[in-house]
Image (tube, helix red, strand yellow):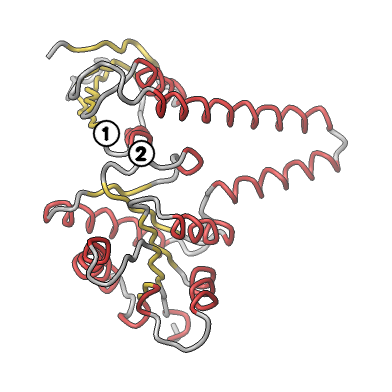
Amino acid sequence: MTEQETKKRCFIITPIGGERSDIRDALDGLLKNVLEPVLLELGFEDKDITVAHQMKDSGSINTQLITRIIEDELCIVNLTGLNPNVMYELAIRHAVGKPVVIIAENGTKLPFDIVDQRTIFYSNTMLGAVHLKEALSDMVENIISNPDHTPDNPIIKIIKDNAILDKIKSDGREHSELSLVLNKLSNLEKRIANTEKRKNTANINKSPEVDWVLEYKGNLDFQKILNSFSGNLDIFPYLTSEGENQKAVFRFNTYVSDEEIDYLLNLVIEQKVNFISFIRRKN
């Protein structure tokens, strides 16, 4: 294998902050203790791991930045703080359909249009750094092992849908085209409604550390549910005997409304498991 074939570059999209600011200190700690060690161990060279404020070449910084976002084999995006520049640069990366790893500090509430994107949430502690390194290493290694895989993201989904619509149109199946569009609009309205409910009822009665017990049959994607609540929910699966219904405790560590409980339940039902019961457990 030639040097050109093995060369890998990673651009890190992250809030930067001013010199000696809390944001810059957090970034430097994340780089030196987690991101760089993981990437170096997986075959990236130090000179090919870049953050915007480290760029030394002359010329337009924006041109260099966007070029790296478009061309690099990997981008790691830190959504902590939901910085507007970071969101814009993530959209560019999504548009080119190349691999991206999204990370965010616990408590980050992802916008509804990317809430279903796989995200590694971490705590800004020494133990949190250990867990982040493990999860990041697994995800990056999986990307490297599947170079021909086209990642899924909101922009790629739209492109694929448009391609389907073009095919339907060429086949003369206009009624199917309309059905697909209406279905997409309906799903979008539901997601917006759920987001608004959660935003407008965030502080309604209820107290922190409220437990709900779910009883079900089948396989649940707990990570997808956790991502939707961005660090405000813990899940503890029961160990059940073979043949018994599965159970899991959902513990909210912040204020939770009835609407948010309904939202969580809808996430469970959408996964098409055999739903049995969902009851509040008295503490």
Q: Provide the secondary structure element on which disc 1 rests.
A: loop
- Front one among 91 and 159: 91
Q: Residue at x 40, y 26 (%)?
A: 198
Residue 220 appears anywhere in the view: yes
Q: Provide the secondary structure element on which disc 2 rests.
A: helix
Residue 167 in the image: above or below residue 75? above
Q: Answer with the quarter of the image where residue 74 lies.
A: bottom left
Q: Residue at x 18, y 56 (%)?
A: 129
**x%, y% of residue 213?**
24, 16
Q: Which residue is drawn at 39% across and 18% down?
A: 259
Marker disc for residue 232? 1
> How many numbered markers are drawn?
2
Residue 223 in the image: above or below residue 250? below
Marker disc for residue 93? none
Q: Which residue is drawn at 31% across and 49% down?
A: 120
- Residue 46 as seen in the image, left or right of residue 143: left
Find disc 2 in the rendering and name its residue.
227
- Of mark 1 and mark 2, the one earlier in the sequence is 2
Nearer the observer: mark 1 or 2; the answer is 1
Which class describes the residues within 10 Å of circle 2: few (<14), some (14-19), or many (20+)? Answer: many
- Residue 36 as seen in the image, left or right of residue 145: left
Residue 37 appears anywhere in the view: no
**x%, y% of residue 282?**
15, 11
Q: What residue type is labelled 1?
A: Asn
**x%, y% of residue 191?**
52, 30
Q: Quadrant of the C terminus?
A: top left
**x%, y% of residue 204?**
31, 18
Residue 225 in the image: above or below residue 114? above
Q: What residue type is labelled 2?
A: Asn
Q: In which quarter of the image is the N terminus?
A: bottom left
